[in-house]
Amino acid sequence: MNHIDQHSYNSNNQSIPQVNGKDYDPLDPEQIIQPWPWFATARKEAPVFYNPKVKAWCVTRYEDVQAVYKDFRTFSSKENGEVVELSPLLKDAFPSGHPSRLSMTKMDPPEHTRVRKLISKVMVPKIISQLEPKIRERSNMLIDTFINDGSCNFVTQFASRLPVQVILDFIGAPPELEKDITLWGKDFFHLVQGDFSEEMEVEIANRGKRIVKWINEFIEERRVEDKGDLISQLIRSKGDDGEPLLNNQEIIGIVNSFIVGGHETTATALSMLMRELLRHPDQWEQLKYNQSLAPNAVEEGLRFWPPIRGNFRKVLKETTIGGVLIPEGVKVQLLVISANHDETVFENPDTFDINRKNANKNLSFGYGIHSCIGAALARLEARVALETVVERIPNIRLVKNQDERWVPNIITSRPESIIFQW
């Protein structure tokens, strides 16, 4: 079955969606910023289609995306396709193999169930809520650094910094790692997609060596002494037989997952939430005078611009998605960014509306066993950040006609720059 032409292996003969004669292309600059017409066309005409650009079958409807998330026996996270082969330089930086190999997102049950159960004990809302005062303090400190300037690049001066600082606080890491961790989040996705130059490869390798060295030292310190933090607790978790429940490689993967998952995606979510709010000044005004709207504004921001545009799975056995026959051994991409705009679930889906009644039905943090374990923390960060900006800079506005400089990426396309003034 793996040798079948994937594009022709389609019972409904559906093809890649087009708008004005242009094929859907996740890396096309126009479609990165304004993808909605292609997704609307896909959901109507080709809800499941093969895209040679990503070498995967793309799933666009809410119901189908949700169904794939639920069926981990057919759609594997662990076997969700080959990662980019590491060059000798990168192999030297990452002796344990590709960094994504150790991530919890690359596990299937029962391995995933065991690891997630352990982490879930410290990711409950009661514990997460205790971080709010520190997150608020961090938010205010960041705003202090630029409030007197009358303008800022919100992406680099706030949205990319706050999540890193929060994660470093959460896992008990030193603040001087902020710059390396910030860049490592971006490096990780470049290593997944393979979209880096030779010059970038050298930078990634050098930074990777520092990160790997620090993670190993960080874990070893906690083996010697219980620091009372998350990693110390995981290291000391033992089964009924008295044996450790996690091996060293799994703990490394957990630390790395927190660093990457807790930074890059939250930074994107914060940036896009503020961007949309200030593109809709009437809704910003509502929020200014009614901060109780903040939690739903966060959900609408997540729905409108999910930080992860599409997750991948590998098909373990021939199956059908949305009436389309999919062969064994291929990849599917769950286009959450399309599912979140499915008109059968969300009324006027391409309209940003912080008063939307069902905004929290978004699939931005996944669904089922692989729903993001850090979702509560990300939501808390976004709400507190939003409240802090409203309180400190209520007259903030989006600079018109600016060049936002979007980063093209199949998984996490995002702007590098969004300029606000006040």
Image (cartoon, rainbow, N blue to C red):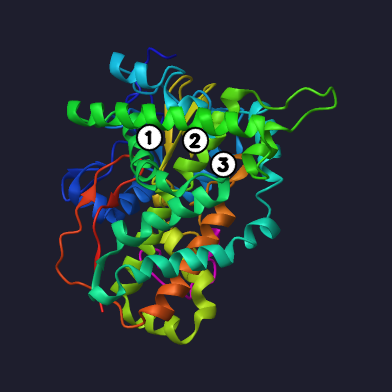
Do the numbered discs 2 and 1 sit on residues whose CB atoms are within 8 Å? yes
Q: Position of residue 236 (x, y in %)?
A: 72, 32
Which label belongs to residue 309? Answer: none
Which label belongs to residue 188? Answer: 1
For residue 76, say whether it is visible.
Answer: no
> Which residue is nearer to you in this view: 114 or 229?
229
**Secondary structure under badge 1?**
helix
Q: Position of residue 281 (x, y in %)?
A: 32, 80
Which label belongs to residue 256? Answer: 2
Write the residue at 57% across / 23% down: 249
**In the figure, residue 34 lies in which quadrant?**
bottom left
**Secondary structure under badge 3?**
helix
Q: Please identify the residue farthest to the right as the structure is shown.
A: 240
Vertical arrangement, residue 112 with respect to residue 43, above or below? above
Q: Amino acid under label 2?
A: Asn
Vertical arrangement, residue 243 with respect to residue 43, above or below? above
Give whichever of discs 1 and 3 has the lower sequence position: 3
Write the residue at 35% across / 23% down: 6
Task: Calculate the distance from the C-alpha at mark 2 to the C-alpha at mark 1.
Answer: 10 Å
Vertical arrangement, residue 371 with respect to residue 343, above or below? above
153 sits to left or right of 116: left
Q: Amino acid under label 3?
A: Ala
> What segment carries the magenta color?
348-361
**In the figure, residue 4 lies in which quadrant?**
top left
> Which residue is nearer to you in this view: 240 or 36?
240
**In the figure, residue 358 lies in which quadrant?**
bottom right
**What secondary structure prevails in the magenta region?**
loop
Give whichever of discs 2 and 3 has the lower sequence position: 3
Vertical arrangement, residue 168 with respect to residue 347, above or below? above
Residue at numbered disc 3? 67
